Image (cartoon, rainbow, N blue to C red):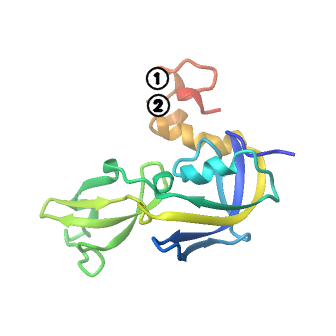
């Protein structure tokens, strides 16, 4: 039976709670078995460190009940504060939809790698908008309860997007060919495409 190790495809169903200073738990997110959260263990970015550490070695069917202190949960990163040019947010006439875009607004965005993330507008000037893409649960103690639904070897097609983003878009995104990115390893462009 496969167990969770780096490179394994994993699906989870779980409930996520924040834990207040008084120990009171508040449900903030649920992932249903019909729409599980999937990731490649050890490769997919963003998995909560405290959760990841407890999942390693578990198999499909294993349940988990994990307390994660804030220091092992969602961490604050100054790199997740980003200043973007205002023209990204303007329409064809150069106008901003001030009903949707204002200081404090939460806006869905897509990264260059195609991942959807949500950021909070922190500041707006005539030239730029500064956004905070840190997770909204930064600084919170967390509690996860759930079940491991699937553990299997990840396919090359499932792993490839994570390596493609490291070299600017995959085998075709390394300047036209795998030899162009300076990586001559057998794993392909930047060590992971094929």
* Front one among 134 and 97: 134
Marks 1/2 in contact by CB < 8 Å: the verdict is: yes
C-alpha distance separating marks 1 and 2: 6 Å
Q: Nearer the viewer, residue 36 or 185?
A: 36
Query: Is residue 172 placed above or below 21 in the rendered structure?
Result: above
Q: Residue at point 46% right, 53% down?
A: 71
From the top left corner, tell me how far across and down residue 84 is, in percent. Answer: 25, 55
User: Mark number for residue 172?
Assistant: none
Q: Which residue is mark 1?
A: 180
Examine the image and state in which quarter residue 140 appears.
Answer: bottom left
Residue under label 2, please give it. 174
User: Residue 180: horizontal and vertical position, in percent?
Assistant: 46, 23
In the rendered view, tell whether residue 118 sits above or below residue 190: below
Nearer-N-terminus badge (1/2) = 2
Q: Residue at x 46, y 24 (%)?
A: 181
Q: Residue furthest right?
A: 1
Where does residue 142 sit, x and y in percent of width and height?
A: 53, 64
């Amino acid at each position: 039976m496969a167990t969770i190790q780096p490179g394994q495809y994993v699906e989870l169903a779980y409930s996520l709670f924040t834990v207040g200073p008084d120990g009171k738990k508040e449900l903030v997110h649920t992932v249903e078995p019909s729409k599980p959260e999937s990731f490649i263990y050890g490769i997919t970015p963003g998995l909560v460190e405290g959760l990841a550490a407890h999942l390693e070695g578990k198999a499909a069917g294993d349940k988990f009940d994990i307390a994660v202190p804030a220091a092992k949960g969602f961490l604050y990163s100054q790199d997740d504060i980003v200043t973007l040019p205002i023209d990204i947010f303007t329409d064809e006439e150069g106008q901003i939809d001030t009903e949707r875009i204002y200081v404090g607004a939460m806006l869905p965005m897509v990264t260059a790698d195609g991942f959807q993330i949500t950021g909070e507008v922190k500041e707006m000037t005539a030239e730029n908008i500064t956004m905070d893409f840190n997770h909204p649960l930064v600084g919170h103690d967390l509690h996860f309860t759930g079940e491991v639904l699937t553990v299997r070897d990840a396919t090359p097609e499932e792993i490839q997007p994570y390596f493609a983003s490291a070299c600017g878009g995959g085998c075709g995104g390394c300047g036209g060919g795998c030899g162009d990115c300076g990586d001559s390893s057998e794993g392909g462009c930047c060590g992971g495409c094929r």
